[in-house]
Image: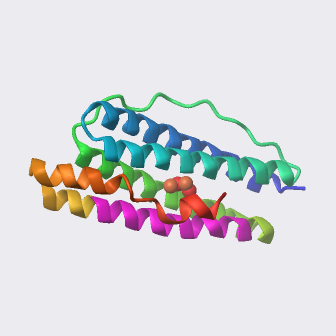
Amino acid sequence: MLNKKVEKALNDQIKVEAESSQAYLAMASWAEINGFPGASLFLYAHSDEERMHMLKLVKFVNDRGGQAIIPSLAQPAKDYKSLHAIFTLLLAHETKVTSEINGVVEICLREKDYTTHNFMQWYVSEQIEEETLARNILDKLKLIGNDKGALYFFDRDISTMKAPAGAEGGK
Ligand code: OFO
């Protein structure tokens, strides 16, 4: 049986992952209608990965005798100033997710739930890769600044980029 405090922490994390998926979906949709087809593809894929992170938690909670709570979500922002603004938000969001994941890990240790602790390690390493990727993308966008030509090539290149472990790691 899943420890109640751990179950609550995992359910909170289900909401965090669902919110990530929803936020990146909104960003993808904005990019799609604002001339950034490559970034849009990247963000749609990232949104799918976050949904997969959520599903992985849902299955884990249910498989261990708990009950996954499927949360309601607030509407994400509709408009963004630029791709730079989007990836600044994305990095800030991922940094927040990392500290939330660390919080779940801490609860596992406190409650001596080593099985969940072990399960959560996948999320811990995933976050390192996601933060690095977001930082690299932001660095590129900072260099590009207002150079429209460079932005065009950036958008073309990002369509083939993948958040490293997200795709294979959880499927
Ligand atoms: Fe990128 O957040 Fe999931 O774990």
Q: Residue at x 42, y 63 (%)?
A: 131
* Image: 29 above or below 115: above
Residue 160 image-quadrant placement: bottom left
| Left/right of residue 110 with respect to residue 34 in the rendered view | right
Estimate the x, y position of residue 97 in percent, counting from the top left. Answer: 50, 55
Q: Nearer the viewer, residue 102 or 167?
A: 167
Residue 86 image-quadrant placement: top left
Q: Nearer the viewer, residue 130 or 118?
A: 130
Estimate the x, y position of residue 117 in percent, counting from the top left. Answer: 72, 68
Estimate the x, y position of residue 93 in percent, counting from the top left. Answer: 42, 51
Q: Quadrant of the image for the C terminus? A: bottom right
**Residue 129 shows in this picture:** yes
Estimate the x, y position of residue 152 in percent, counting from the top left. Answer: 19, 49
> Is residue 75 rendered magenta in the image?
no
Q: Residue at x 64, y 46 (%)?
A: 14
Region rendered in magenta:
117-137
Q: Main secondary structure of the magenta part?
A: helix
| Left/right of residue 16 with respect to residue 37 in the rendered view | right
> Is residue 129 rendered magenta in the image?
yes
Q: Residue at x 45, y 42 (%)?
A: 44
Q: Nearer the viewer, residue 93 or 27?
A: 27
| Left/right of residue 26 with respect to residue 11 in the rendered view | left
